[in-house]
Amino acid sequence: MSSRPSPAAPGRAAGPAGSRWEQQRSFDELGRPLRDITFCVVDLETTGGSAQNGSRITEIGAVKVRGGEVLGEFQTLVNPHTPIPAFIAVLTGISNTMVAAAPPIESVLPAFLEFAAGCVLVAHNAPFDVGFLRHMCTEQGRAWPAFEVVDTAILARRVIPRSESPNHKLGTLARVLGATTTPNHRALADARATVDVLHVLLERIGTQGVQTLEELRTYSGRVSPEQRRKRHLADALPHAPGVYLFRDDADRVLYVGTSRDVRRRVRTYFTASETRTRMGEMVRLAARVEALECATPLEAAVRELRLIGHHKPPYNRRSRFPEKVTFLKLTREVWPRLSVVSQVLDDDADYLGPFSSRASAEQCLAALHETFPIRQCRDRLGRRSRRTPCVLAELGRCLAPCDGSADELTYGAVVRRLRDTLVDDPDDVVEAVNHRMAVLAEQERFEEAGVHRDRLASFVRAASRTQRLTSLTSCPEIVAARREDDGRWAVHVMRYGRLAAAGTIPPGSHARSVVDQLLAAAETVRLTAATPGPVPVASAAETELVLRWLESPGVRLVEVEGEWTCPVSGAARRLAPHGSIAEPAPFAG
C-alpha cells in the first residue's frame, strides 16, 4: 500500500494550462474601481409616500458623475394628473399651476432611463426613489433596467457616527459634511446635495481600503479597517478551482477552504459578506493565503479533506479528526456478539460503519439487539459455560449461551441472519422495529415509538453506507469521466475508494492519450493486512465524495477493475432520496 492519506495532491495528467478550468473573469470577480464608475444620483418629488397607494411623481432631478466630475444633469417637472396636496405644495414649493403644462410621466420616464443607462443609481433613502421609478415602469409595461443601487442613507449610518451627526437625514448630513448645495425639497438641488454627501462618504471609506464598487456594496462598519486592509492577500490567488489555506505569521494553518474560484472566494473574507464571528478573528490573525490549484472541483474537495485532517486547523469545525470514527463489530468467536469499537482490525470480523459518533452507533446497536437475541455481555465464553443467566435471558431477549441453554447450531443460525442483515438484506430489522413501533403507537406511547424510529433510521443509514462504501473500496481501480459545463471532460482515477488522479480532457484532444497520462501519473495504492475494513486507504468522507461524484448524472465509466456492485436487496432501497426511511411505521408522534 502507499502512504496513508496526506495533503499531497492526487496524480494529474501532464499538460499546459488546458488542464485547468479556465473561467472568464467577470467584473464582480475583478472589482470595478470606484473612480471608473459612473453614478447617476437621483431624487424625486411626489404627491405622497407610496406609489402603490396612488401617489405620483411631480419632479425628477438627477446628476451624472464619474471620478468626482459632473458629466450631466437632468431636471424636469412632471404632470401628475392629480391634485397636489396642500402640505406637499408648501413643503416642496411645487404647485398645481407649475405642473399643469409639464410633460406626463409617460414621456419623462423614457428620457430619464436613457440618461441613467449604464450608470449605478444613487439616492438618499433609495427604496423610496427607486420604488417609485420601478412602479412607473411596471405601470407603463416597461422592463426595469435592473440598475445597481447605492443608498447614501445606509452608507452614512455605517460611516458617520451619532457623535458627529445627530441623525442621517440629507439636510443634516449636507450641513455637517459641508455640502456646497443646501437641500430644499426640490429634486435637482437635493440630487446635487446628495452628490456632495456621496463624495465625502467615498473619501472616508477609501481610507479603510474600500476602492471598488463590490467593496462599497458589501461595506459594513462591522468589518474592521485592519481586516479590510488585508484584502491584498487575495491579489495573487488564481481564478480557478482549488484549495486555499490561511496561515498566520508563524506559518501555521488557520483555516482550509475550497472554491471553484479561489480568488473570488478569498476576497469575500475581507468584506461584510463574511458574517461568521470566528472568521473575522481568523482573518485578523492571517498573514498570508496559500492556494493550491486543482483540475476539478472533486479534486479540490478531496484535497480540502486531506489538508484539514493533516493540519487540523483551529478555525475549521468539520473533518478535523477523520480518525475519530466508530464501528459496530460482529465478533468472530464461539458465541459472537456485537461491539462498538473505534478501530478496524484484520481479524476476519464483520464491521458496520463508520459512524460519525458513538451515540449513533449505539442507536444502531439497540435496533440490532431488538431483532436478534444474541448475547450482550462482554465476557469470554467457552463452548460449555455454566453461569447464572442475566436479566435479558429471563426476558427472552437473549439465547443465553452463558448458562448452557443455547446450542451452537441455533445460535449460529441467528448469527448468520445477523451477518446477512449487515451485508445484504436489512428486512429482518426493519420489520421487527416497524412492528414494535406499531404496537407502541396503538398504545399511544409515541415518545417510545419515536426512539425506535430513530434507532431504525440509524441502522438503515449505516447499513446502506457500509454496503455502498465496501462495494467501491473493493475495486482496485475505476476510471470515470463526465462532461462539464465548459465542454471539457473531467476524468478521475479511483483506487480502492481513494482518489488517485484527476484531470481534464480539452475539446479536440485525444481522449485515450490523456487518460493514459493520467493513469501513469496516478498515485499507487495497495491493500495490505494493515488496511482492513470498509474504508481501507482513505477516510470515509473522501470515499463518500468520490462515490457521490460517481453516482452523479452524466458520469461515464471508462475502465473498471473488479466489480462495483451493490446488493439488490440492500439497505439503500429502504432509504428515501432525502435520506429518511422510505417506509416508516404509520404512527403520529
Image: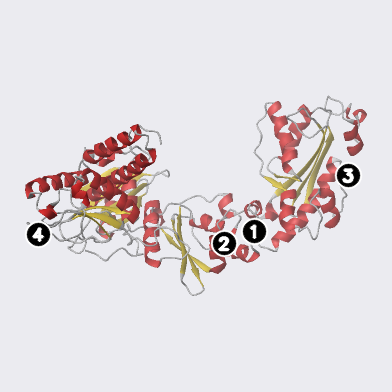
Question: Identity of the amino acid at label 4?
Answer: Gly
Question: Of residues 339 and 230, which is closer to you in this image?
Answer: 339
The image shows residue 108, relative to residue 272, as above or below, that is above
On the image, the x and y values in percent for residue 141 come to 67, 26
The amino acid type found where label 2 is placed reads: Gly
Q: Which residue is mark 4?
A: 382
Q: What residue does disc 2 label?
A: 280
For mark 3, give the secondary structure.
loop
Q: Separation of disc 4 and disc 3 at Cα?
A: 99 Å
Residue position for label 1: 222
Disc with the residue nearer the chain's start (4 vs 3): 3
Q: First in sequence: mark 3 or mark 2?
A: 3
What residue appears at the point 65 percent right and 51 percent down from the top-left corner? 217
How far apart are the alpha carbons under marks 2 and 4? Answer: 61 Å
Q: Which mark is residue 184?
A: 3
How far apart are the two marked residues, 4 and 1, measured between alpha carbons?
69 Å
| Nearest the eye: 218 or 561 | 218
Badge 3 density bin: few <14, some 14–19, many ≥20, Cα 10 Å: some
For marks 2 and 4 on the same chain, the one whose residue lies earlier in the sequence: 2
User: How many numbered marks appear?
Assistant: 4
